Image (cartoon, rainbow, N blue to C red):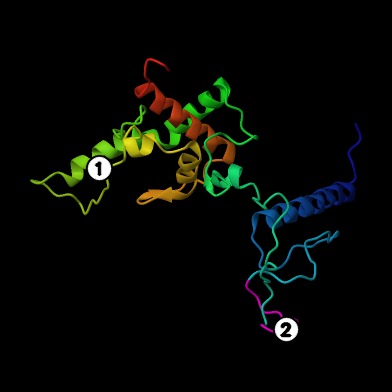
């Protein structure tokens, strides 16, 4: 077999080494952070004239880029005009029935039980007597006269079967779940409107189970 000319061998070696340079450079560039902006062949929306939040804008008299919503306006679907559905109120009184958007059936009560067990039972207990695990532990800490209470302050969770709570209309229960009352925080931000109604319906079912007469 004839040998290749030495010049050709050297040329191939040099060409092979040169061919390795671009992949090495690309790999190095990808692995090394750069303070410069990346090269954008297609700008799309990466670079556009705009004002970011909390920056000045000389266009307006107050010099601010962020504008307050026009007074009296509401986002689409956020008018909350149905007082029965969103506040539990009908004609200025607490609603005594569920709104039209919520159906009283077994599925609603099961959903209410599930949400109640997640959000409410920790303090009020699974049966609603105010004997939840969090409440019991807190009461132990505040009543510990011989040891440190670690600054614990606690208002005992209310039993949902007390006469004052048992006689509350379902709309009032919904409003309390939504906005809270006294030391209890509201759950309007954590629980959807329909689920809050389901919880209120389930609470009324719990109360009825402990206060049912022969006629019920």
Magenta residues: mostly which secondary structure? loop
**Marker disc for residue 58:** 2
Residue 30 visible: yes
- Estimate the x, y position of residue 177 in percent, counting from the top left: 46, 43
- Estimate the x, y position of residue 16 in percent, counting from the top left: 81, 48
From this view, report whether residue 8 is shown above or below residue 199: below
From the viewer's side, name the closer residue of 30 and 184: 184
Q: Nearer the viewer, mark 1 or mark 2?
A: 1
* Numbered disc total: 2
Asked if residue 53 lies left or right of residue 42, the reply is: left
Give the magenta range: 54-62
Query: Which quarter of the figure has residue 144?
Result: top left
- Estimate the x, y position of residue 56 in percent, counting from the top left: 67, 79
Tags 1 and 2 touching, CB below 8 Å: no
Residue 189 visible: no
Q: Secondary structure at mark 1?
A: helix
Asked if residue 122 lies left or right of residue 173, the reply is: left
- Estimate the x, y position of residue 167 in percent, counting from the top left: 39, 36
Q: Secondary structure at mark 2?
A: loop
Q: Quadrant of the N terminus?
A: top right
Residue furthest to the left in view is: 146
Dot 1 corresponds to which residue? 138
Earlier in the chain: of badge 1 and badge 2, it is 2
From the viewer's side, name the closer residue of 86 and 23: 86
From this view, report whether residue 96 is shown above or below residue 50: above
Classed neighbour count for the residue bearing mark 1: other residues with Cα under 10 Å, few (<14), some (14–19), many (≥20): some
The residue at 69%/58% (across/down) is: 74
């Amino acid at each position: 077999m004839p040998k290749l000319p030495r010049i050709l061998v050297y040329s191939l070696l040099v060409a092979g080494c040169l061919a390795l340079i671009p992949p090495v450079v690309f790999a190095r560039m990808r692995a090394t952070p750069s303070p410069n902006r990346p090269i954008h062949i297609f700008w799309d929306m990466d670079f556009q004239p705009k004002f970011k939040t909390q920056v000045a804008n000389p266009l307006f008299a107050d010099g601010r880029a962020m504008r307050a919503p026009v007074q009296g306006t509401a986002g689409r679907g956020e008018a909350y005009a149905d007082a029965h559905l969103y506040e539990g109120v009908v004609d200025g009184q607490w609603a005594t029935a569920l709104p039209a958007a919520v159906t009283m059936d077994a599925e609603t009560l099961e959903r209410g039980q599930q949400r109640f067990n997640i959000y409410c039972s920790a303090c009020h207990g699974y049966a609603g007597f105010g004997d939840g695990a969090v409440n019991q532990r807190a009461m132990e800490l505040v009543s510990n006269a011989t040891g440190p209470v670690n600054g614990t302050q606690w208002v005992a969770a209310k039993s949902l079967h007390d006469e004052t709570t048992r006689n509350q209309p379902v709309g009032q229960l919904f409003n309390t779940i939504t906005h809270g009352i006294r030391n209890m925080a509201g759950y309007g931000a954590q629980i959807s409107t329909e689920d809050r109604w389901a919880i209120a319906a389930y609470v009324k079912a719990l109360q009825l189970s402990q206060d049912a007469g022969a006629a019920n």
